[in-house]
Image: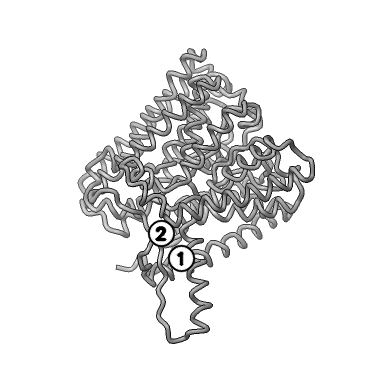
Amino acid sequence: MLLIIESFAILLAVPFSYYYGSRSLQFSTLMNGKDDLLALLLSAVFIFLTGTAGLIFTRKGSKKDIGKREGFVIVTMAWIIISLFGAIPFVLSGAIPDYTNAFFETMSGFTTTGASILNDIESLPKGILFWRSMTHWIGGMGIIVLSLAILPLLGVGGMQLFIAEVPGPTPDKIHPRVAATAKRLWAIYVAFTLLETVLLMFGGMSLFDGLCHSFGTLATGGFSTQNASIANYSPYIQYVVIIFMMLAGINFTMHYFALKGMIKKVSKDQELRFYLAIILVSTIFIALTLILKNLHPVEEAFRQTLFQVVSIVTTTGFVTYDYLQWPSFIWFVIVLLMFTGGCAGSTGGGIKISRLLLLLKNSRLEMRSQVHPNAIIPVRINGRVVPQQLVNNVLAFFLIYFLIFAGGTLVMSLLGLDFESAIGSTAATLGNIGPGIGIVGPVSNYAAIPEGGKWFLSLLMLLGRLELFTVLILFTRSFWKH
């Protein structure tokens, strides 16, 4: 069913391919890197037939009940399979003829990482660029949530899929039924996308560019249709993108509560406050540094800093300036921001603000317990006691996250990358950020990464997008025991 959805998503790129001049349906035009209409149509048909065949041949033996174990398997395999098939249009059109690169680009899209291997984005056909941005948009809210919203067949036991898919340790349910929850989340997601598109068009963008950049913004992905990302656009457009990146990094249930008039509940949310505080403090510190060192005028320093901070914190990955040109101690701040991420329940990747908040609160209580060893003081967030099991889960998440980061840095170093680039590529893909430091910096890409490194970084993207446990649990012996 997910492959069938993917085939129809590919067809949405066909009108843009046709409108912008690719009208050839000759097989001789395949793989020339310029005509994409036939490649998109053939890809959609092939993926649709494969999905239909899978649906037919597995119908009789399928389980109606989806338990927690099945949920982990379905979610993990779904992301892998849609990426394997989603790479086909890139290969068939010749835009990315090498399958490893095509898969890397597709996995980067669906996981909303935004890491690219493309050196000349503007030379690609518009249909391919639209499909590239569409992978962001689908992956942003999650293709599993999409299926819950439009396929009630997965309603039974669907919460297992929702928990495995939606970012954050405690996804709030807006509605008792998961399908209804998914529909409300997607309604907000679509509304924000359309609103940003309109505002970008007011700033001079075409409908095509407006949609593609809105897809990348709301999904916190970062794929652009321009080689320079957002750098060549006006300050107005940059501010619009900043605002919607910030909105995308907020828990979508907060948007729902705000729309329902529950402003007091939103304003008191501790995670939201911490998220805004990180952005504010980081922006002030970096902007003041740039102003005092006369590197930028005041407004430009503020705008460039705010854009980069929000882009990194929300793991969007859009860029307006090469931050590697700034003093090296600012790099350190940016690397630290790579380990934050958006709020739980947002489209952002990374560790998540809620986990950082929980870790800080738990650390403070541990210090208090040293002074008052007999006191029983629970961790509270928004006035609610956090179960110890969840605290343990977060502590385990931090340990595993940084072990994977250290191991990933070692692997990339062994593959020939310098230490700076190894750190940058690992942090940027595991955190679903995109641009890093070193050879994968904001004005560079991942084209120079060895082939084995691209497959490894694709795995890190998947781990980061599904927040480690969903994937890692499949490699434990206890998971497979009946």
The structure residue drawn at horizontal position 58% and vertical position 35%, both measured from the top left corner, is 98
Q: Viewer-proximal residue, 242 or 157?
A: 242
The structure residue drawn at horizontal position 68% and vertical position 45%, both measured from the top left corner, is 287
Badge number at residue 144: none
Q: Is residue 460 visible?
A: no
Q: Viewer-proximal residue, 199 or 218?
A: 199
Q: Would you place residue 446 above or below residue 475 in this image?
A: above
Pinpoint residue 157: horizontal percent, then vertical percent.
Answer: 24, 53
Identify residue for label 2.
169
Task: Give the left or right position of residue 317, taking residue 111 as reference.
Answer: right
Q: Quadrant of the C terminus?
A: bottom left
The structure residue drawn at horizontal position 40% and vertical position 73%, both measured from the top left corner, is 378
Q: What's the amino acid at mark 2?
A: Pro
Label 1: how many Cα within 10 Å (few below 14, some 14–19, many 20+)? some
Marks 2 and 1 in Cβ contact (< 8 Å): yes
Q: Viewer-proximal residue, 3 or 46?
A: 3
Q: What is the distance, in whole Å, between disc 2 and disc 1 at their CAs?
A: 8 Å
Q: What's the amino acid at mark 1?
A: Val
Label 2: how many Cα within 10 Å (few below 14, some 14–19, many 20+)? some
Identify residue for label 1.
394
Looking at the image, which residue sits at the far right? 293
Q: Would you place residue 29 above or below residue 471 in this image?
A: above
Task: Give the left or right position of residue 34, taking residue 365 as reference.
Answer: right
Task: Give the left or right position of residue 104, taking residue 61 as reference.
Answer: right
- Label 2 secondary element: loop
Q: Is residue 398 visible?
A: yes
What is the image's colouring?
A: one colour
Sequence order check, earlier mark of 2 and 1: 2
Pinpoint residue 479: horizontal percent, then vertical percent.
Answer: 36, 65
Q: Would you place residue 447 above or below residue 211 in this image?
A: below
Pinpoint residue 238: horizontal percent, then vertical percent.
Answer: 59, 32
Pinpoint residue 72: horizontal percent, then vertical percent.
Answer: 36, 56
